[in-house]
Image: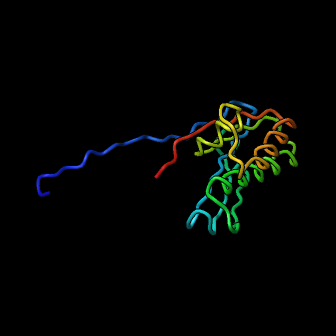
Amino acid sequence: MECYSPKLKITKVLWELPEPGWMNVNTDEASKGNPRRSSIGYVLRNEIGDVLYACGREIQDSTNTEAEAVAMVEALKHYVEHSYLQIWLQTDSLLLNNTVDGTWSSPWKVVGHVEEIRLLMESCEVEVSHIMRGE
């Protein structure tokens, strides 16, 4: 063990500005177990990177995927209610990214949330993308 040297993997994660006229929203969740207490949050930035709105709250008895889906639903609801028409939604959940865009089938636990996300996406122009999570 004295000679052991672990290999480190470094991934550089950079936040990108959205295109002019677009708003960027990042969603995330944190869970204490799966399922258990979770917290969700989202932040809205404009095309120059200014934070326009941020929200976070605790939710009970959800899996990490359910919590991430709830964060996406709540973020989209907020932005549709405030008439933002072009939203770039970024999530660190590859599962939800690929489920929302139709690449993968929705896990049964989040089918309702995914349907609500898709319905909200019909109200405005939404681009959903997967981003690496900064550790």
Residue 9, percent from left and from top: 34, 43
Instruction: Name the outermost residue toward the front.
Output: 108
Task: Name the residue at the left extreme.
Answer: 3
Q: In which quarter of the image is residue 127?
A: top right
Kindly identify the residue that appears in the image at 76 percent across and 44 percent down. 114
Of residue 51 and residue 83, the one placed in the foreground of this image is: 83
Return the residue nearer the eye: 60 or 109: 109
User: Residue placed at 56% from the left, 67% from the top?
Assistant: 32
Q: 111 or 29, which lies in front?
A: 111
Color theme of the render: rainbow
Q: Up-down: is 95 above or below 19? A: below
Q: Residue at x 68, y 67 (%)?
A: 61
Residue 128 percent location from the top left of the image:
68, 36
Up-down relation of residue 60 to residue 65 (above or below) = below
Residue at (68% x, 55% y) in the render: 66
Q: How many marks?
A: 0
Quadrant of the image occupied by residue 106: top right
Displayed quadrant of residue 34: bottom right
Q: Is residue 90 above or below residue 110?
A: above
In this rendering, position of residue 92 left or right of residue 7:
right
Observer able to see residue 132: yes
Q: In the image, residue 15 lies at what x, y percent?
A: 55, 41
* Residue 47 appearing in the image: no
The quadrant of the picture occupied by the N terminus is bottom left
